[in-house]
Amino acid sequence: MENITVVVVDDVVDIRENVRKLLNFETDIAIVGEAGTGDEAIDVIQKLRPHIVLMDINMPGMDGITATEIISIKFPTAAVVMISVQEDQEYLRKAMMAGARDFLVKPFSSEDLVGTIRRVHEKQKQLMQFSVPPSQGADDTPSLGRIITFFSTKGGTGKTTLAVNTAVALAELTGKKVCLLDLDLQFGDVAILLNLKMASTIAELVEQSGEVLDPQDVMAYLQKHSSNVMALLSCPKPYLAETITIDHIKQIIAVLREEHDYVIIDTSTAFRDIELTALDMADLVMTVVTLELSAIKSVKLSLEVMEDMLRYSKDKIKVILNRESPTFGIAAKDVTALLKHELIVRIPDEAVIVTSALNRGLPFFISDDRSAPVMKSIVALAHAVMTPEDSGVFLSRAENDGGFMGKLKGFLKR
């Protein structure tokens, strides 16, 4: 049987040695490394990839909470057990929100330590069944759906509107299974844009299922829109967002990508653990910018974070210019130069069409006026995120269609 490997992180050498003594006689648990700071812990975990990390909260430099947030994102197979001398509910809440699996209060007994390590390891194995994609290449291995995350660090860019209409356009243009996941957990608007009731939400799913989600329960909480897009809605009350953990998000995304051809994720405007998980798991990150200097500055900074810190390739990150208009005094070429990114699609500013549809609880792509430039730009956006196979089928249909699809042919080749 494989040993449970452990890394101990504490700035006090005597405590690290005491943990070794407590685990000395456990034949199935092996301490493979130690660290005295959060920074050291990340380096050690990157080299050793342990099953369990015993993490002290209060340390000089990077504290345990910050280190846990980074570890849970960069090394999802490592489960963190937080250790503290303070049995405080606020510490516990912060630890769990950071991604910790359990919490031990010093001093603890050998029985408590060993039991926690074994329990957390067993739970982690169950979670990894959902969050680690199966190996590809076998003929009988089902292909996984494409994950497309819409993100912007600037509010008011129209990110949610584009995510919703892209999902609707994909469902219509490809005939494939499309799911929309609202991860703006506190203030998500997907329900409003699709005119869906907040009857089945991610908060209710988590409340019913606990830490390990049943795939059937995940699917049961999806709502079907008239466009055939399935949607998992955000929390009905902002405070319920605290009940959703990184592990929940990983499991939900893993289930949705197994059951759908496309998973469109809408996020909030911050680099927090939930958003980072959605970005990390995405095949494409759609970053939305508008012709406002504050939006351009914000998006430029977010692109630097994704490229320099998160190490995303430029192929993964796509930039969308929304609400393009000559009246703003900034041209698309200026945005390209400032961001050092090509604009994958430029969405024209057609506020009447977009706002009218929004107020009726309809995605504007469903509008009858398919000749409007904003409609064609959404088709171009949907086409840009299609798989190569679906893109080929779509272009073939456009080539042979004399109606709306046929008129798009020239537009898509610009």
Image (tube, grey):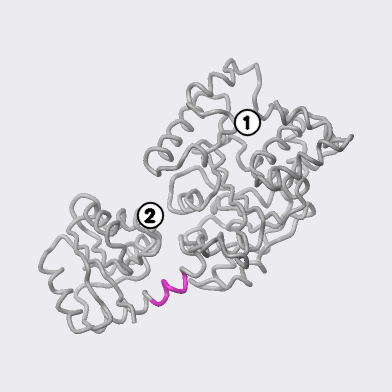
Q: Image quadrant for the C terminus? A: top right
Is residue 358 positioned above or below 33 on the image? Answer: above
Question: Separation of disc 2 and disc 1 at Cα?
Answer: 32 Å
| Residue drawn at x 68%, y 43% as measured from the top left | 166
Q: Residues within 10 Å of mark 1 (few under 14, many from 20)?
A: many
* Magenta residue span: 122-127
State the image coordinates of residue 108 (x, y, percent, origin top left).
Answer: 22, 77
Q: Quadrant location of residue 185?
A: bottom right
Magenta stretch prevailing secondary structure: helix
Location of mark 2 (residue) = 74
Q: Is residue 297 magenta?
A: no
The first of marks 2 and 1 along the sequence is 2
Residue at the left extreme, as displayed: 14
Seen from the viewer's position, the closer of residues 252 and 31 is: 31
Relative horizontal placement of residue 170, taking residue 332 as reference (left or right): right
Q: Residues within 10 Å of mark 2 (few under 14, many from 20)?
A: some
Seen from the viewer's position, the closer of residues 385 and 287 is: 385
| Residue drawn at x 72%, y 50% as measured from the top left | 194
| Residue drawn at x 55%, y 73% as measured from the top left | 209
Seen from the viewer's position, the closer of residues 381 and 414 is: 414
State the image coordinates of residue 193 (x, y, percent, origin top left).
Answer: 70, 46
| Residue drawn at x 64%, y 16% as measured from the top left | 327
Question: Does the CB distance between marks 2 and 1 fall below 8 Å?
Answer: no
State the image coordinates of residue 398 (x, y, percent, origin top left).
Answer: 81, 37
Q: Quadrant location of residue 56?
A: bottom left
| Amino acid type assigned to the residue bearing label 2 in the image | Lys
Q: Is disc 1 placed on a helix, strand or loop?
A: strand
| Amino acid type assigned to the residue bearing label 1 in the image | Asn
Location of mark 1 (residue) = 322
